[in-house]
Image (cartoon, rainbow, N blue to C red):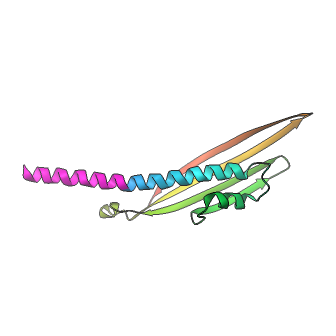
């Protein structure tokens, strides 16, 4: 009975430790994704006077996570694509052989179109979000 209690206690402790590492990973991934979403939409605005790279870097603050920013613009549109990546060192999962977890996030496209017909101007947002999570 004592052996079974110790085994169950050890398994419950391992699950708690796993939850701590996964919670840290998800918190970092969510922060990066929300920041990337906001920055790409701000950079894609037609009224934005700064370059897209400057806007995304200003939103991120710590540009060490930022992987790249690409811009495509024309007469009545601007498309911005950005991605970020962060590696989180695990506290407890290294006991199971997982030393780090990498969170890759990307915002595929933030485009603002303005179409004018006669004297009426309309605008709309189009965005596709792509989420990628990789374990290393």
Depth check: give the residue in front, 69 or 43.
Answer: 43
Residue 10 lies left or right of residue 20; in this view the side is: left
Q: Position of residue 43 (x, y in %)?
A: 72, 53
Whether residue 108 is in magenta: the answer is: no
Magenta-highlighted stretch: main secondary structure? helix
**Residue drawn 77% across the image and 50% down it:** 78
Q: Position of residue 28 (x, y in %)?
A: 49, 55
User: Is 85 situated above or below 109?
Assistant: below
Whether residue 5 is in magenta: the answer is: yes
Residue 42 lies left or right of residue 105; in this view the side is: right
Q: How many marks?
A: 0
Q: Position of residue 9 (x, y in %)?
A: 18, 52
**Residue drawn 66% across the image and 53% down it:** 39
Q: Position of residue 16 (x, y in %)?
A: 29, 52
Tell me where the magenta segment starts and ends, as one range.
1-20
Depth check: give the residue in front, 74 or 116.
Answer: 116
Quadrant in which residue 136 is drawn = bottom left
Residue 56 lies left or right of residue 24; in this view the side is: right
Q: What residue occupies the far right of the structure in this picture?
A: 118
Does residue 44 show up?
A: yes
**Residue drawn 70% across the image and 50% down it:** 42
Residue 96 lies left or right of residue 75; in this view the side is: left
**Residue drawn 18% across the image and 50% down it:** 8
Does residue 133 show up?
A: no
Q: What residue occupies the far left of the structure in this picture?
A: 1
């Amino acid at each position: 009975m004592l052996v079974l209690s110790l085994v169950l206690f050890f398994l419950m402790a391992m699950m708690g430790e796993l939850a701590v590492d996964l919670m840290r990973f998800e918190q970092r991934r969510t922060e990066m994704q929300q920041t990337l979403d906001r920055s790409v939409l701000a950079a894609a605005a037609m009224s934005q006077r700064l370059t897209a790279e400057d806007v995304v870097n200003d939103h991120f603050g710590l540009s060490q996570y930022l992987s790249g920013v690409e811009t495509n613009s024309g007469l009545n549109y601007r498309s911005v694509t950005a991605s970020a990546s962060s590696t989180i060192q695990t506290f407890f999962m290294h006991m199971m052989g997982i030393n780090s977890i990498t969170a890759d996030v990307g915002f595929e496209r933030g485009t603002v179109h303005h179409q004018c017909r006669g004297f009426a101007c309309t605008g709309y947002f189009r965005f596709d979000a792509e989420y990628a999570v990789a374990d290393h």
